Amino acid sequence: MALADYYSRGALAASQVLSGFDEVRFRAKLEETRVGIAFDETIRTPEGQTLAELLTRLLSRLYPRLVLLGPPDAVGQLAALGKEINPAIEITDDEATVGISIGAVRDLFETTFYAGSAGWDALLSATRIRPTGDTENPFGAAVAACLAAANIFRRVFLPDWKEHVDESLRFSAWSLDRTDRPTRTRQASWHLSSDAVLVGVGAVGNAALWTLARAPIDGTLHLVDPQEIELSNIQRYVLATRADDGRSKVELGSAWSTRGLTLRPHQLGLAEFLSQNGYTWDYFLLGLDSERDRRSAQAALPRWIGNAWTQPGDIGVSTHPRFGEDGACVACLYLPDGRLQNEDELVAAALSVPQLQMEIRTLLYSGAPLQRGFLEVVAAAVNKPVETLLQFEGRSIRNLYVEGFCGGAVIPIGEAGRPPEDLHVPLAHQSALAGVLLGASLVRSNLSGDPSTTSATRINVLQAVGSHLAQPIRASRDGRCICDDAVFRDRYQAKYVRGGAGQSTKRAMPKAIVPGERT
């Protein structure tokens, strides 16, 4: 039994949400804890299968000891999946400290949480068996898996976990909020009215795609991301197994077209994708890392945007059905307050070499490999043996910054302080929950279920799920945002209101509002 070889990334994610984080104690807690999933024949239903598989995909990335209890053939399939995610994981049928029950299975673990679903609704309880539906709708079951994993995490790592248990929860992936009544909305035979674009196939995008690919939906979804998977990504990418290290993100994603959804991979930045494929798109799903990238995506003026994020305090999804009206646009949510540090300033300060800022700027721009001489200067500045940094010789300056100084490879996790928000590393269930809700928002829009104005749902996964989570967001109209600009508003009207919504075209967009390259 062993922790995954990408364990340090999971430890970094935990350090950003757990107060007083101590990596030695955290590691010991992981190694001594058995986490279980128990299920009965319910796993033969589409919703039961979604619940069990996503739980396995989430738990196997962090916990090195997994207990699976249920029909032998299903146990074998989930065990094989867990081994693909972490080849060193220990999978047994022993007793477990804490676990999830799916179906009519009671009290098999020291602490048991009961998960179920009913179409759009996720069901969770700390005391009672929850039913599992037999619909083809994966969204309620996927949300239940994420929230169950959040309860497991709180049980294992929070001393006051009993104060934060989801005692009896029904959460609607349709309304993106807690609800007391079953969601009565169409469960199948969904159709995308026009092509959609998933911008960013990282952790959030992985979960959105995993769920949409299982959904009873037909249409075309374009996957846009220029990057490849790195080992550290596997900590939270639910599509990825250990063997996917180095694989193109869009290549991995496009392999998941299992039902009626056609997936079109584009290993490009957003600006290049738009230049090649036109600027008129009805649906953008944003699974992006940075505020700047989100603002750039809004500047492309798609008709509708679903935007998801993770941050230390919460995860969230915002739905933007129209641009330029009372509701906030995506750019409104990320207007800078005051001067922001440039990336070269951030990196130079983290490496304690402000005198090398210009050299760092060049390295960031060129992507040139780091030389030993540079690493020797950094090692002296942070009072570390140069041997500690030599693992980054020949690699990029971003690798050194993200893995070495934010990720604990050079400076122990916690000593370097909290990284900038754009470098926040979410826990797997955080990213997955944001992505599942993002995918649900696309289906909801195509079933004419959009809110009347911009709405955002925020969930703190370190606490029990609250109520009245979905709230409208109005634009401030203080003149700072692109949605205050008459040129942008008029262009949007010409594309979708006066000109009518439609498929992507190759017609050019005014140069001033073509978004910049993703970095």
Image (cartoon, helix red, strand yellow):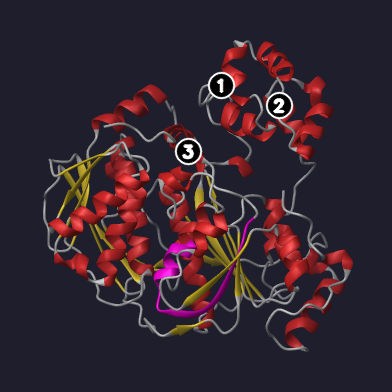
Query: Where does the image place residue 244, in percent across and percent down from the top left?
Result: 47, 48
Secondary element at image label 3: helix
Q: Look at 19% across and 59% down and name the residue there.
A: 74
Along the horizontal axis of the image, is 277 left or right of 87? right
Q: Which residue is at the front of the view, 317 or 410?
A: 410
Secondary element at image label 2: loop
- Magenta-colored span: 208-225
Marks 1/3 in contact by CB < 8 Å: the verdict is: no
Along the horizontal axis of the image, is 28 left or right of 278? left
Q: Look at 60% across and 27% down and name the residue there.
A: 405
Residue 331 position by quadrant: bottom right
Q: Residues within 10 Å of mark 2 (few under 14, many from 20)?
A: some
Q: Which residue is at the front of the view, 479 or 384?
A: 384
**Mark 3: amino acid:** Ala
Q: Is residue 292 visible?
A: yes
Classify 225 as above or below 473.
above
Instruction: Check disc 2 and report the residue beneath it.
Output: 370
Give the foreground label among 2 and 1: 2
Q: CA distance from mark 2 to mark 1?
A: 18 Å
Classify 8 as above or below 100.
above
Q: Which residue is at the front of the view, 509 or 445?
A: 509
Residue 52: assigned label: none
Residue 411: assigned label: 1
Give the foreground label among 3 and 2: 2
Instruction: Check disc 3 and report the residue beneath it.
Output: 13
Query: Where does the image place residue 29, in percent across and percent down from the top left?
Result: 30, 30
Q: CA distance from mark 3 to mark 2?
A: 26 Å
